[in-house]
Image: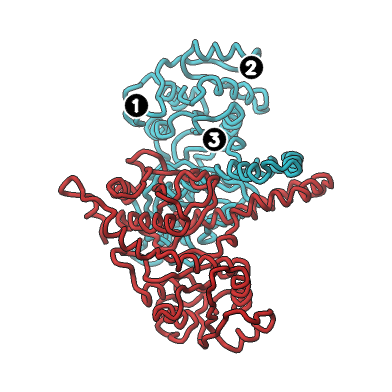
Chain colours: A cyan, B red
């Protein structure tokens, strides 16, 4: 109920997902029953496995995340996450207040053993396919240990959900050399070097779209800025093309004719294709999307959640957290310094 | 002499600049005389105001910046910067080792009064024109005071070089709210609020290309990542379009026909158009470009340097540093905390 167009887009997206989905899953719509039923009537949902669980409160975009969760015990977010916690649902999706979804995921589902800070990952298109960037905005201040944990979680997601055999992991930095960047990043380099992950060293801003590594690790400040910058590129290009064609019929026709190609090229930069991004490091499957998500974005988010729920991801994250770091060779291993 | 194609591209760029430039300037080429003369012979430079100052050493891309400057007293970088220091040149341009150019600018020219850390700015195209981003990679760890100084320098550049009357300044952050981001960024917000700059608050990654503010302030880690990411967008799009058209004659023809429009739209994302970026906060005009800069990029860099030299920029920066911050209302002003 927390999205900008709730529950209209949520209902439409769920129905689209059920029509497309081949895996035999069900959708539980959590929120104000009357409003949801009203929306359901606008679609042909006959025969689709949809049910409603009533929750009369709504956490808004402006609510302070943790306080809102405590006060609004009967919010669609709290009730839905609780259903997941109790095993009545295998995954949770929301396009509501991101901070509140993250808090609910952490507080209700709990952290995976070995994870100090749950994180949100994001996906980037690249010349070679798709890459996963962690953290996409959750933790703006990170120590080395946090960056290391993001790497482990990102690598497991890449492996288990994207089916990359031995995903390459790059540390986002301002240069290739080991001694570049902030202290936290330099220490994270040392940790990653000691890990059993397929760490390829530092990567730079230009390596994201190039696809130099399948996993890109950074703090949430950088991740958030780069994610939002990337999302703004298609709009910028459209605006520039429009300026270029303005008042010139030939150019307008040409651009019109080539629009399909452009749209296809830009589609990979369109977040709607990915639908939502996962909260990683919690005991469950929790997906978050933009407040303004379209039904299409919501559809893709639901389908992705089904896929993640079926992958057994969290079991692998827990295992990797316990085993991926080899003991430091020196007595004063830099790993110790970074633990929160 | 430090660029990847030195001195060929430097000579070609200088000649192009002199042919295009209308301001009556001269170019001094600093480096190995024989090599430079050899390149000059390949062009028709008759009548152009070009001279050569010999310098037989070269600081390479792999040299450690500060050490190299001390050891190679007769490098083209040291000799050229010295000419500028002595007033024999009004500006300095290089596409060599960025760290070394920054060190030479700081050590030889000295800092402007009131500036704690010189910085490198970069330019971004936006829907509304061009915006200046500071820091673009110089200072990866920044305190509030540094961010504040970047804002002052960026605003003066925008005002005096881009002729924006009262340039808007945005603080790059992960959200609009004052309390978002790291401690340093939150403190910088407080400083900027108290300043006489046209501070519009936090801006996000998506605001860069949108042109929400004419100056964007961030630390050098974020700035470097976003700059390199932005530069990689045209290549990514070309690659995606090629993939889309592959094996389809109609699509290939269509994209071929629309190529001009695309190129024009992408041109604004092409760093060659800007040529180089300025070192800000030093007593002089020092411009830096990519090691692999084309003659065209070098040409634009030289023309930009002429423009900056004529703008009186540094006088305004010094003045703004002394006057733009209003006294804190509370006794324990947050400004004090951040000073390095």
Local packing at callout 2 (Cα closer than 10 Å; few below 14, some 14-19, many 20+) is some
According to the image, label 3 marks what residue?
A276
Protein chain holding label 1: A
| Residue A221 rendering spot, x and y as whole percentages | 42, 48
Residue A181 seen anywhere in this rendered image of the structure: yes
The answer to whether marks 2 and 3 sit on the same chain is: yes
Kindly state the secondary structure of the residue where label 3 is placed.
loop
Distance (Cα) linking label 2 and label 1: 33 Å
Local packing at callout 3 (Cα closer than 10 Å; few below 14, some 14-19, many 20+) is many
According to the image, label 2 marks what residue?
A48
**Number of numbered labels in the structure image:** 3
Left or right: residue A301 versus residue A145 is right
According to the image, label 1 marks what residue?
A68
Choose between B107 and B310: the one closer to the eye: B310
The quarter of the picture where residue A258 lies is top right
Q: Which mark is residue A55?
A: none
Residue B327 sits above or below residue A36 on the image: below
Kindly state the secondary structure of the residue where label 2 is placed.
loop
Left or right: residue B9 versus residue B253 is left
Distance (Cα) linking label 1 and label 3: 22 Å
* Numbered disc in front, either 2 or 1: 1
> Counting residues from the N terminus, which is met first, the one under dot 2 or under dot 1?
2
Kindly state the secondary structure of the residue where label 1 is placed.
helix
Local packing at callout 1 (Cα closer than 10 Å; few below 14, some 14-19, many 20+) is some
């Amino acid at each position: 109920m927390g999205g900008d167009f709730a529950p209209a887009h949520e209902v439409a997206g769920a129905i689209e997902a059920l029509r497309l989905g081949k895996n035999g899953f069900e959708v539980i719509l959590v929120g104000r029953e009357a409003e949801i039923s009203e929306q359901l009537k606008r679609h042909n949902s006959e025969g689709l496995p949809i049910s409603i669980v009533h929750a009369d409160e709504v956490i808004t975009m402006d609510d302070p995340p943790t306080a809102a969760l405590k006060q609004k015990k009967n919010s669609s977010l709290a009730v839905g996450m609780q259903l997941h916690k109790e095993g009545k649902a295998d995954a949770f999706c929301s396009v509501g207040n991101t901070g509140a979804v993250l808090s609910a995921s952490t507080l209700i589902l709990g952290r995976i053993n070995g994870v100090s800070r749950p994180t949100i990952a994001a996906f980037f298109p690249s010349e070679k396919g798709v890459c996963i960037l962690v953290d996409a905005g959750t933790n703006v201040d990170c120590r080395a240990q946090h960056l290391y944990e993001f790497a482990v979680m990102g690598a497991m997601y890449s492996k288990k959900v994207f089916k990359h055999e031995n995903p390459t992991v790059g540390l986002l930095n301002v240069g290739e050399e080991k001694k570049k960047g902030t202290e936290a990043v330099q220490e994270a380099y040392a940790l990653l070097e000691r890990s059993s992950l397929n760490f390829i060293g530092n990567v730079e801003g230009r390596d994201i779209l190039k696809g130099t590594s399948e996993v890109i690790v950074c703090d949430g400040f950088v991740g958030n800025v780069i994610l939002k910058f990337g999302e703004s590129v298609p709009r910028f290009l459209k605006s520039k093309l429009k300026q270029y064609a303005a008042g010139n019929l030939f150019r307008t026709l040409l651009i019109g004719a080539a629009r399909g190609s452009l749209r296809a090229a830009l589609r990979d930069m369109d977040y709607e294709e990915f639908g939502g991004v996962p909260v990683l490091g919690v005991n469950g499957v929790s997906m978050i999307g933009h407040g303004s998500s379209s039904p299409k974005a919501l559809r893709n988010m639901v389908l992705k959640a089904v896929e993640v729920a079926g992958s057994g991801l969290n079991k692998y994250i827990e295992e990797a957290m316990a085993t991926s770091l080899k003991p430091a060779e020196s007595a004063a291993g830099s790993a110790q310094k970074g633990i929160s």
